[in-house]
Image: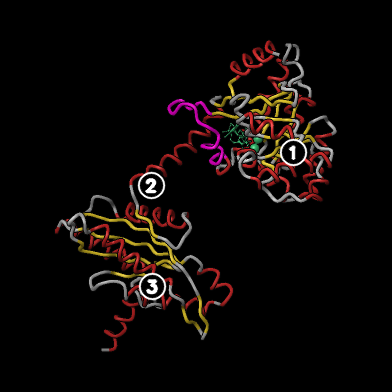
């Protein structure tokens, strides 16, 4: 008798979570394999729900593990109350639970709504306040769901898909549910592919510089912002918003910025003897990860020196995110570059939290008013006030100012009336490739 008892205990330990008494990951995987085989035999369907508590970590860290444990036990009980006999509730570890619904019959109308209604019930139940040691706590959950039919996919694939759906649920603001679908998978694969392709793009010179004219108050083009495009061998021209975030994620953005700067310097050197391009200034975007490199100043100076252009024709566009981490270090770096003749423009101005005292410290020459404010400057009085204030602020600090995203004559004349002396936007030109930009400048020159 005793040894049977011990066997049972060992069995429980191997297959059940000691805290919640629910099946553990191992038993869950067993049951999943069985359910998939049964669904193959009976032509039935099943659903896998991954459930993750949204703010468990917080509670666990602030209220102690004891409170955390009590919450998890509570969650387990609530989950059990949401399912029928034959369904499985398991604790996979931490604050992750799984519900498997087996033996669903596909009457088409029934399947997805059934899984969804269970998931909604789970969300509802888990969202109710938890009473722990006499205090009430709130903790929401997110759910990812995949349906399965027979053994069309492996258990690993199924888990991966459910995980991806959970990730989507978390990403779309938590406390919600998401079904896995093929487009999710495609999106994931496309991202992975894009990152692989990006690594080649630099080596194989698939990037191209585009130039968007920058105008002064008299309507003359004084320079251009350099904007990157990716000429992908299969996908054609890709816009920066569709690849720069990936380049940031995989740590390539600093190298890309250096490459852009090098090309821009090369262009300035080539233009240095060609009227009307000789005095043109180029503004180059610099990402936070490039700027924060310890060797940034030396790198920039080396790039400029190697191309032999005049540093006074270079303007670096920085965003506040580059500067706020360590303002003193940022100022030091900027001052060293400034003494070599390089200028700085503060990009996307107004979207961060620039304070006046912070602005005064920075050795910048220009504020670049973000296009989000310019867009509504003629229609929203709030935005008009902001733009006017920013122009006034720049003037008081002795800074140049340029408005980006100028699309209409009405916006232009309002900006002029505020005393804004520089503009960039579709009203003058979209970003152009080199050939297009050269033509545009020549045409503009003739009209002037
Ligand atoms: P950004 O620096 O704010 O660049 C301005 C963006 O506004 C450009 O988009 C430009 O095409 C667009 N734009 C210009 N005029 C107008 C207008 O009148 N209306 C509207 N709606 N948009 C206008 P683009 O070229 O797609 O670049 C997007 C962002 O990608 C840039 O925003 C910048 O943050 C980033 N980026 C582009 N090139 C580089 C680069 O070489 N290095 C780094 N680090 N980032 C870059
Ligand atoms: Ca910019
Ligand atoms: Ca901008």
User: Quadrant location of residue 373?
Assistant: top right
The reply to whether callout 1 and callout 2 are in contact (CB within 8 Å) is no
Looking at the image, residue 32 sits to the left or right of residue 352; the answer is left
Question: In this figure, which residue is indicated by the disc labeled 3?
Answer: 125
Mark before the other along the chain sequence, 3 or 1: 3
Give the residue pinned by disc 2. Answer: 184
Measure the C-alpha gap from mark 3 to mark 1. 51 Å
Mark 3 secondary-structure assignment: helix
Number of other residues with Cα within 10 Å of mark 1, as a class: few under 14, some 14 to 19, many 20 or more? many
Percent across and percent down for residue 123 are 39, 67
Which colour style is shown?
A: secondary structure
- Provide residue 267's location: percent of width, then percent of height: 68, 19
At horizontal 78% and vertical 26% (from top left) the residue drawn is 311
Q: Quadrant of residue 251?
A: top right
Q: Which residues are magenta?
A: 230-247
The residue indicated by pointer 1 is: 367
Disc 2, SS? helix
Quadrant location, ligand no. 3: top right
Which numbered tag is attached to residue 28? none
Looking at mark 2, is its residue's CB closer than 8 Å to ligand 1?
no
The reply, left or right, for residue 268 in relation to residue 429 is: right
Front-lying residue, 70 or 298: 70
Q: Is residue 34 visible?
A: yes
Tag nearer the camera, 2 or 3: 3
In the picture shown, does residue 283 fall above or below 250?
Answer: above
Give the class, few, some or many, for how many residues have Cα within 10 Å of label 2's Cα (few <14, many ≥20).
some
* Residue 94 spot, x, y in % from top left: 46, 68
Q: Are marks 3 and 1 in contact (CB under 8 Å)?
A: no
Could one spot residue 299 in this view of the protein?
no
Relative to 436, is 150 above or below?
A: below
Instruction: Choose mark 3 or mark 1, whichever is in front.
Output: 1
């Amino acid at each position: 008798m005793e040894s049977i008892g011990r066997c049972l205990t060992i069995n429980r330990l191997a297959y059940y979570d000691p805290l919640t008494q629910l099946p553990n990951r191992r038993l869950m995987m067993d049951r999943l394999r069985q359910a998939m085989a049964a669904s193959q035999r009976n032509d039935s369907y099943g659903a896998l729900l991954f459930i993750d508590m949204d703010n468990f970590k917080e509670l666990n860290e602030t209220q102690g593990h004891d409170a955390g444990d009590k919450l998890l036990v509570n969650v387990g009980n609530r989950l059990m109350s949401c399912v029928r006999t034959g369904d499985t509730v398991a604790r996979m570890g931490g604050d992750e639970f799984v519900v498997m619904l087996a033996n669903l019959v596909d009457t088409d109308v029934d399947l997805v709504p059934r899984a969804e209604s269970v998931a909604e019930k789970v969300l509802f139940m888990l969202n109710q306040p938890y009473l722990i040691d006499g205090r009430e706590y709130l903790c929401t959950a997110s759910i990812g769901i995949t349906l399965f039919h027979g053994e069309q996919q492996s258990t690993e694939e199924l888990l991966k898909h459910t995980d991806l759906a959970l990730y989507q649920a978390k990403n779309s603001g938590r406390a919600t549910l998401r079904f896995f679908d093929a487009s999710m998978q495609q999106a994931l694969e496309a991202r992975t592919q894009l990152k692989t392709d990006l690594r080649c793009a630099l080596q194989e010179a698939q990037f191209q510089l585009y130039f968007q004219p920058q105008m002064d108050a008299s309507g003359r083009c004084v320079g251009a912002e350099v904007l990157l495009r990716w000429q992908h061998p299969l996908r054609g021209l890709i816009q920066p918003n569709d690849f720069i975030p990936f380049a940031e994620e995989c740590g390539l953005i600093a190298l890309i910025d250096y490459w852009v700067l090098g090309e821009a310097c090369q262009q300035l050197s080539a233009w240095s003897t060609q009227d009307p391009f000789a005095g043109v200034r180029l503004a180059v975007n610099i990402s936070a990860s490039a700027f924060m490199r310890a060797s940034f100043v030396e790198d920039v100076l080396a790039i400029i020196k190697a191309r032999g252009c005049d540093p006074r024709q270079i303007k670096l566009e920085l965003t506040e995110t580059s500067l706020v981490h360590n303002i003193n270090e940022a100022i030091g770096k900027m001052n060293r570059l400034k003494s070599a003749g390089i200028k700085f423009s503060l990009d996307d101005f107004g979207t961060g939290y620039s304070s006046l005292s912070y602005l005064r410290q920075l050795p910048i020459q220009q504020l670049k008013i973000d296009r989000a404010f310019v867009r509504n400057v003629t229609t929203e009085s709030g935005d008009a006030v902001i733009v006017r204030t920013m122009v006034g602020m720049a003037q008081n600090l002795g800074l140049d100012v340029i408005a980006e995203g100028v699309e209409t004559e009405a916006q232009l004349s309002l900006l002029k009336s505020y005393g804004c002396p520089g503009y960039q936007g579709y009203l003058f030109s979209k970003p152009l490739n080199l050939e297009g930009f050269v033509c545009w400048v020549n045409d503009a020159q003739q009209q002037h």
